[in-house]
Image (cartoon, rainbow, N blue to C red):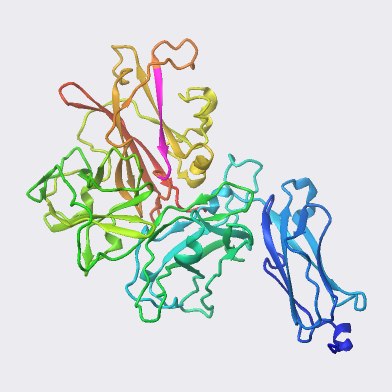
Amino acid sequence: MTEINRNNILVSTVTPILSVPNETTVIYGQTFYLDVTLNDKNNFPPGASLKVTAKGQGITISPIEPPPVSSGSEKSIVGHYMVVISSDETKITSGLVSFSVDFTSTQYPNIFNSDFQYNVKKIFPSSLLLQTDKYAFVIPEKYSKPDKNDSQDKYVIYKTILLENTETSLLKTQSKIPLKNALVYLVTQERPDIRNDIIVTSDPDKGGNDTLIIYKPTKIKNSDFTFIKLISDASTGEIRFRVYSNNKPLLGESDTNSRPTVIYLGCIIYEVEENYMAHSVCFIKPRPSINLDELDQLYIPDSDNGVIKGDPDSPGFEVQIDTGANYKNNDQLLFFTKEENNIPDVNSLISSPYTIRSDINNYSYPIPYNSFTINKKSEIFYVIARKGDTLYSGSESITYAGGGSGIVPPGAVARVYNKVEVFSSYADYNDDNTLSNPGELGSRLDEDEVTTREQLANYIYNGGNDAYLRIKATNDPNDDKYPKVGDYIFINMYISSENKNLWQPINGNNGIRLLSILDKYPAHNTTICSTVVPIPHPFYTDIDAYENIPAMVYFEYYTVDESNHKIYSKVWHGPTDTSSSI
């Protein structure tokens, strides 16, 4: 029979550990998993039962498994629970919910009893969107255990600052109040990756006293749901962590066990919002030492024996990838200009990855001139990144001879047509596909105001569009301010920023035909017909401002007449910072 020290029961030495600590901030409507662990220096008495009970309204707690009962031989006991926070603010008093933890038996009714509470607040969902410091990461050839003092080329940094929503509507001015000590779940789009292909750790200050923590993913029993619990910084509201490639060898004799993959990570409020997933990060293997060049070299129409002369009316040239390769849906396409010892220089990545669709019918991509130094021999090659494999093209030698324009619309062209109008992701495109209703003016982006992440955040609800461009055409043959209905236009987007400097044709090289349906507004309109062109996510997202000034985004469009002469619009240009949440 187990001997019980009754004196230790009268004066409790039980230590409680909550997987979601006391005073954590949770979100209205949030669901989360809670483990309650009780530890003692002595064995618990037999027959003691652990109970976790919600107090008052606004919180529901349900055991995932039958409540644990002590056998008399353990010094630790744990219960698993599902917690649901009400989305109804009227049920939660003073922004607090509470619950009690009781561990009792018939013989010993007061082994442990204590109350705990959580703060309940609202969040700006778009502040969940993570930023990264890299789009591509080359898997090291040898495994080394993550270390606090690792150089930054050995991992990828993810970060964001959570923001409290103090307004009554997401469409109002965004608050700048950090949401501190708040619970979120880190998930992947492909859930097994977070357990197998990557290692997620804290990001301690290299000069500080904090240790590096390797986060262990939680997999819910009888479910595919896997997550890592994160809590925002108690002072700043920041979520920040490192991601390493999990190239640990399966056997001790192997140097590495490369797991090439494409990762999409996101912080979520479980059961509340759609998931804001960060842009893809490609974990790629080095080029094989015996290079079979799985992909053909790029075809560059403007190359004359490796020399490219710039077009003064264009910021770049086009390249064509291998048209006969066996591409897969969601393959990621990356262009590099440097490699050393078969290892691509991730700093030479020309732009963020392009996503290839299985029904690919356009193999051409824009390359900015400013990716190369004038009159300096260089190279360019591309990589296909996918889960389980990395494919390389041969390297193409080129020399850029100069002459092209910068990453701004060309200034030496005649600009005739009116500017585009730009609308946020909240514009009601589904019900008003010309955006001519006067009610849409509230979602129009002004050129003298900074475009923010929040204005693009509705892409997860509107079908995947960051913003919309409205182009007006006319059926009046004498009105030269607008292109004519039925004309085909070509749209260019230019980005000048801290992290992106590129030019992006909208809709590829395909012309967009202007509609001939008259706008319903204003009343009695007889000539103006609008065509709206969506800007797909993530074209407008993740654009960093410079240190002291915002980034700039430009839009222009043009038509091409029968003599192949381009007629341009005036330029819409707006300050932009769609990367930072604060």
**Residue 532 shows in this picture:** yes
Horizontal relation, residue 30 to residue 368: left or right: right
**In which quadrant of the rendered image does the N terminus lie?**
bottom right
> Is 161 or 463 nearer to us in this picture?
463
> What residue occupies the far front of the structure in this picture?
1
> Is 82 or 437 nearer to us in this picture?
82
* Residue 327 on the magenta segment: no
Horizontal relation, residue 323 to residue 166: left or right: left
Horizontal relation, residue 106 to residue 371: left or right: right
Which residue occupies 30% across, 47% down?
502
Residues shaded magenta:
529-538
The picture places residue 95, in percent across and down from the top left corner, at: 75, 54
Q: Is residue 381 above or below residue 137?
A: above
Q: Is residue 366 above or below residue 251?
A: above
Main SS, magenta region, reads strand
Horizontal relation, residue 4 to residue 253: left or right: right
Which residue occupies 82% across, 65% down?
100
Query: Quadrant of the rendered structure where residue 235 is?
Result: bottom right
The picture places residue 364, in percent across and down from the top left corner, at: 24, 42
Which residue occupies 7% across, 49% down?
305
> Is 575 or 390 nearer to us in this picture?
390
* Residue 536 on the magenta segment: yes
Q: Is residue 329 above or below residue 256?
A: above
Query: Quadrant of the rendered structure where residue 236 is?
Result: bottom right
Query: Quadrant of the rendered structure where residue 377 is?
Result: bottom left
> Is 571 or 308 nearer to us in this picture?
308
**Residue 114 shows in this picture:** no
The picture places residue 405, in percent across and down from the top left corner, at: 20, 43
The picture places residue 84, in percent across and down from the top left corner, at: 72, 54
